[in-house]
């Protein structure tokens, strides 16, 4: 993004000194982060360092014990009525897909727009069919999740998130549960989305993907943001010793 | 046996109908009450969970016969509420079934993966919408087999209503025995009738299970 454009744009998502604890254990420790429209922010780091928890706090699946999260103009508060407004505009893609097994792929995609946004079925179905083409699954529209491969299920999950016309997409290790040969299909769809200018927050171990499409890379360790830089820069020249150590261990 | 059924067949079949009806009513009301208690057991609020647990444990541990006595003899003394044998028996069966159904409902809801809730909540659904469209339909499939078991248990327990004077299948059989004196034949006849009814319920339950199985789960 052009620096001048960035300066005038307001962040779509803002985390201010967020603290998350489970009992006494600190999961997120003073995390601050702003995401601008059109950015693809990639979060990397060792497992168990709070990356997934961070995403789950953003849409209020987890509550926070300190700090604030603002999405567009809403203060995100878990267990509040207002959090539903936030969730309508944030699409979330899970590591384990979480498709509804008792519904076909098409119904999985149509359900939330029909129930939550109360849009007419024909309108939603039209959009859903286009989304299946976009994720290259036009031929699997009537399949049940149990009949689909992991990669296909994850692409249905992406279509399901897109069906709500979200202004932010969050990916929680979207390829970690996939067979290696289906990872590429999912990453290709995610790349398409990034190139469309979608705002994305991606937790992943796919460094290649991060470098190719990420506008910014964040390295997290032990609940803190340790380092933040454009992906190529961080890879070529990691400043913090922990970042250096982590990158050495995975590359 | 053949002579008992030949002479009293119509009466026994009508009595079997009454037994089916009162146990169905007990299961239905108990199922509704049990669903409410079962939902409370999975609630976010601790107080609600504890109250629901106490309810379940209490009614699960009281013998159905005592519940019937309580509803029939106890309520008039306690609150001046006079129930007919039918109403008292139905209420007792309802309380007994509700404690079992509460467990069935809780187990059904717990069987649905956490990720299903999260995906549905993340898409902006409210609790009721998640329950109705996502978790409920999946839980019901798990609940069906044990519910059939509860229905059969309730149907057998309904024979206890004979003791507070409600004329259902067992009471009818006992009256026929008094009239004819053919104890063994009467016992054999109602044994067979109970078996046929409950086996029928099992078959219907099995058919429902296959009908609602998730395709390609």
Image (cartoon, coloured by chain):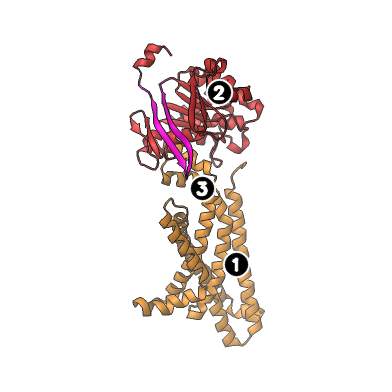
User: Compared to B187, does A229 lie above or below?
Assistant: above
Q: Earlier in the sequence, mark 1 or mark 3?
A: 3
Q: Nearer the viewer, mark 1 or mark 3?
A: 3
Is A24 colored magenta in this rendering? Answer: yes
A99 to the left or right of B184: left
Q: Are marks 1 and 3 on the same chain?
A: yes
Identify the residue at horizontal 66%, vertical 27% (top origin): A180
Res A9 → quadrant: top left
Disc sitting over residue B197 in the figure: 1
Q: Residue furthest front?
A: A241
Disc sitting over residue B137 in the figure: 3
Which chain hosts label 1? B
User: Compared to B162, does A50 lie above or below?
Assistant: above
Q: Which residue is mark 2?
A: A241
Q: Are marks 3 and 2 on the same chain?
A: no
User: Compared to A247, does B155 lie above or below?
Assistant: below
The shade of chain A is red
């Amino acid at each position: 993004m052009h620096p001048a454009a960035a300066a005038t744009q307001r962040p779509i998502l803002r985390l201010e000194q967020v603290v998350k604890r489970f009992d006494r254990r600190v999961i997120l420790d003073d995390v601050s982060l702003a995401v601008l429209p059109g950015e693809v922010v990639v979060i990397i780091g060792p497992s168990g360092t709070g990356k997934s928890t961070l995403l789950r706090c953003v849409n209020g699946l987890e509550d926070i014990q300190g700090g604030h999260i603002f999405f567009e103009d809403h203060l995100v508060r878990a267990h509040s009525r207002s959090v539903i407004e936030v969730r309508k505009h944030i699409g979330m893609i899970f590591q384990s897909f979480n498709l509804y097994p008792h519904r076909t792929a098409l119904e999985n995609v149509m359900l939330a727009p029909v129930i939550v946004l109360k849009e007419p079925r024909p309108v939603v179905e039209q959009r859903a069919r286009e989304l299946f083409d976009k994720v290259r699954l036009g031929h699997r529209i009537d399949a049940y999740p149990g009949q689909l491969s992991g990669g296909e299920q994850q692409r249905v999950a992406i279509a399901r998130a897109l069906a709500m016309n979200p202004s932010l997409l969050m990916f929680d290790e979207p390829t970690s549960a996939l067979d290696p040969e289906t990872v590429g299909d999912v990453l290709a769809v995610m790349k398409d989305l990034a190139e469309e200018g979608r705002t994305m927050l991606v937790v992943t171990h796919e460094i290649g993907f991060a470098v190719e499409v990420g506008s910014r890379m964040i390295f997290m360790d032990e609940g803190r943001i340790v380092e933040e830089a454009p992906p190529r820069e961080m890879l070529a020249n990691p400043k913090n010793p922990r970042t250096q150590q982590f990158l050495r261990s995975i590359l | 046996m053949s002579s008992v059924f030949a002479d009293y067949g119509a009466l026994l079949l009508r009595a079997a109908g009454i037994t089916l009806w009162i146990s169905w009513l007990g299961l239905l009301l108990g199922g509704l009450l049990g669903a409410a208690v079962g939902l409370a057991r999975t609630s976010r609020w601790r107080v609600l969970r504890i109250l629901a647990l106490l309810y379940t444990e209490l009614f699960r541990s009281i013998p159905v016969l005592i519940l019937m006595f309580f509803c029939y003899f106890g309520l008039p003394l306690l609150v001046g509420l006079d129930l007919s044998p039918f109403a008292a028996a139905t209420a007792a069966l309802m309380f007994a079934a509700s404690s079992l159904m509460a467990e069935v409902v809780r187990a059904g809801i717990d069987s649905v993966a956490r990720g299903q809730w999260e995906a549905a909540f993340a898409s902006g659904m409210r609790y009721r919408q998640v329950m109705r469209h996502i978790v409920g339909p999946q839980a019901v499939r798990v609940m069906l087999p044990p519910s059939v078991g509860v229905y059969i248990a309730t149907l057998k327990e309904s024979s206890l209503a004979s003791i507070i004077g409600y004329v259902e299948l067992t009471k009818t059989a006992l009256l026929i025995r008094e009239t004819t004196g053919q104890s063994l034949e009467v016992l054999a006849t109602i044994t067979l009738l109970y078996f046929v009814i409950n086996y029928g319920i099992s078959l219907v339950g099995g058919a429902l299970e296959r009908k609602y199985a998730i395709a390609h789960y």
